[in-house]
Image: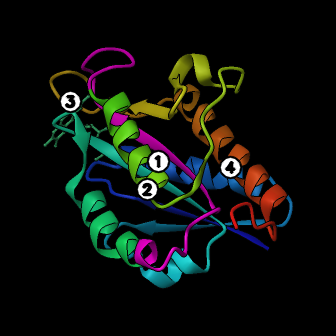
Amino acid sequence: MVKVLIVYASDHGGTEKMAQAVAEGVKLVPECEAELKRADQATIQDLLSSDALLVGSPVHMGSIDWRIKKFIDTVCSGAWMQDKMIGKVGAVFASGAGYGNGGGGCELTMLALLNNIAELGMLIVPLPKNTPGYQAAGLQWGPYGRAHAEDLSPKGLSEEQLISSRNHGKNVATVAKALKGIQVFA
Ligand SMILES: Cc1cc2nc3c(=O)[nH]c(=O)nc-3n(C[C@H](O)[C@H](O)[C@H](O)COP(=O)(O)O)c2cc1C
């Protein structure tokens, strides 16, 4: 089996909903399984046993959530020290509120996460613009959600917004499956 680990943080359920949609997409690919973990529950063993890592964060003050940063600094760093994630597949997603369309920090949050994924030596899967759902909730870096209005009143993620998340999970699983067993870096 190909294991895709999905790590996320969420206060109001938006990022969690995206994570669940990503997991649904992973499971559409035969021989692929998804493991969902909150950032404070994910361990280095989860990383070592995975073939791909997807990290999802709420946008906080235009950047990543502190629990995700803690996961990166305290859990991912252990695998980074041992070069254990090199050549595995990595991808990201983010959930913001209503501040701008594709802006408001979703891009910066995903770019910050992708920087960490690159630091780990992972192979990044972007979100190609022909991916179903891209028009409603996609950036080239990954899918985004808009779960709250500008006054932070909850409006929830629409089904339309979750399509890109589902397809992102499917894309990541497809790539991880194709690369399983192949050592891309010496
Ligand atoms: C402390 C804090 C800072 C936030 N900063 C931003 C921001 O800079 N840009 C934005 O679009 N949303 C911002 N938000 C809104 C959240 O990103 C948004 O509500 C997100 O969907 C929450 O994800 P969750 O439902 O998984 O908790 C902020 C929320 C909090 C609590």
Question: Mark 3 and mark 2: span between their CA atoms?
Answer: 36 Å
- Mark 1 in CB contact with mark 4 (< 8 angstroms): no
- Mark 1 in CB contact with mark 3 (< 8 angstroms): no
Q: Which residue is mark 3?
A: 153
Q: Quadrant of the N terminus?
A: bottom right
Task: Give, as a three-letter code, the residue at label 4.
Answer: Val
Task: Give, as a three-letter code, the residue at label 3.
Answer: Ser
Task: Give, as a three-letter code, the residue at label 2.
Answer: Glu
Res 173 → quadrant: bottom right
Secondary structure beneath label 4: helix
Per the image, is 102 magenta?
yes
Is label 3 or label 2 in front?
Answer: 2
Per the image, is 19 magenta?
no
Q: Which residue is mark 1?
A: 17
Q: Which residue is mark 2?
A: 119
Question: Mark 3 or mark 1, which is nearer the start of the sequence?
Answer: 1
What residue range appears in magenta?
79-104
In the foreground, 78 or 47:
78
Task: Give, as a three-letter code, the residue at label 1.
Answer: Lys
- Whether disc 1's CB lies below 8 Å from ligand 1 is answered yes
What residue is shown at x 69% (from left), y 62% (from top)? 185
Image side of residue 179 versus residue 76, left or right: right
What residue is shown at x 68% (from left), y 49% (from top)? 172
Res 152 → quadrant: top left
Question: Which labelled disc corresponds to residue 172?
Answer: 4
Is label 1 or label 4 in front?
Answer: 4
Is label 4 or label 2 in front?
Answer: 2
Q: Quadrant of the C terminus?
A: bottom right
Crowd around label 1: few <14 · some 14–19 · many ≥20 (10 Å): some
Judged from the image, the quadrant occupied by ligand 1 is top left
- Whether disc 3's CB lies below 8 Å from ligand 1 is answered no
